[in-house]
Amino acid sequence: MTKITQIVGQNKRWVRLQVDPAELRPLMKREDARPLRDMIIWLGLMGGFASLTTLLWGSWHAVIPLYIYSILYSTGSQSREHETGHGTAFKTKALNQFFFELTSFMVLRESFLRTKSHDTHHLHTIITDKDPEIVTPVPPNYRALLANLFMIDRCIRGLKDTTIHALNLLTEKDRHSGRTALPVRAAGKARLWLLILAATVAWSLYLSSWLPVLLIGPLPTMFGGSLRHFFALSQHVGLAQNVRDYRLNTRTIYLGPVLGFLYMNMQYHLEHHLYPNVPYYNLPALHELIKDQCPPAYEGLWPVFTELLPVLWRQRKEPGYFIKRVLPGPGTASS
């Protein structure tokens, strides 16, 4: 049984569903076996397609396994960086932190930057003057939308920020966020990242081959970034801004097992925003528990984009236009 309640955060009131604690408590339990299995499968698939790319290198046949590898590298690491950044993937903190640092390097976003930014995103989801992770502004910036199909801006920004932090300096964004000094060991980690990237470039030069830089660093992130960008657009874009009801600004999408594995169940994005402490492997069960109080889920990415693309075009001239999601039942409208 669910009911509507109001929660208070930063003197702002959000409409949220309240689940019976006896039903919610089991869903918040973390474990190590399932996420470790999923990480091993993911890394194993990456290793397999990297090996196949190496065997076929020099032939156009290498493009297909390289592209699959790049999707696993770019989209797969983004999803895992997100979940481990929440600290909810593993029961064991050390495992969570290890994979958080690994995937942070792969997506070229330093872990300390991600933590503050994403916490703020959850607190002020699609509140235009407070959310630092709005994927596209309104009216839309079409150049940025196209560039981010290949994560170009993200990679350039990541390399720039990492270089500045390696010099133990603050970026303009750091200062704007109120930061006065880098966290302990941040400069050292930034230098390690740059060392790994420089070594990869040197390896490519030594071999007179593009292969190493296509397997490690920004190039696989960009080459495999399109699906990652589609996932990001599907979460909130085109929905209501400046409303404090996650059901009106966040989507849940039904995906098959392959995309669900790659996305680490973040297709249940509404459930994730309502209860961010629920691990990814329990989000399907949470969805079943609360779906009667939420708008219907989308049946795949195609319905999302057939609805979303006309909205992005219309927002050129009507920036106040957005998709109005219908809430089920009486008394469930947003405040």
Image (spheres, rainbow, N blue to C red):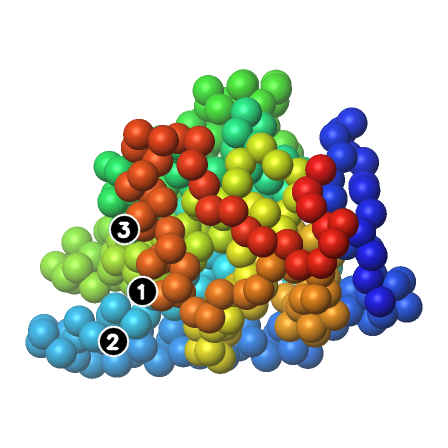
| SS class, disc 2 | helix
- Which numbered mark, 2 or 3, is in the foreground of this view? 3
Q: Residue at 17%, 71% (x, y): give it.
A: 63
What percent of the width, then of the height, locates residue 10? 76, 29
Taking the view exactly as shown, the residue that stands out farthest to the front is 330
Coordinates of residue 296 in the picture (x, y in percent): 57, 64
Q: Using a 10 Å C-alpha cutoff, classify the residue at mark 3 as few (fewer than 14 neighbours), some (14 to 19) or many (20 or more).
A: many
Task: Determine if residue 77 is in view.
Answer: yes
Q: Nearer the viewer, residue 20 or 307?
A: 307
Compared to 161, does 207 lie above or below? below
Q: Which residue is mark 2?
A: 65
205 over 52 or under it: above or below: above
Residue 40 appears left or right of 291: left
- Under mark 2, the amino acid is Pro
Residues at discs 2 and 1 in contact (Cβ within 8 Å): no
Q: How far, Cα to Cα, is label 2 from label 1?
A: 8 Å
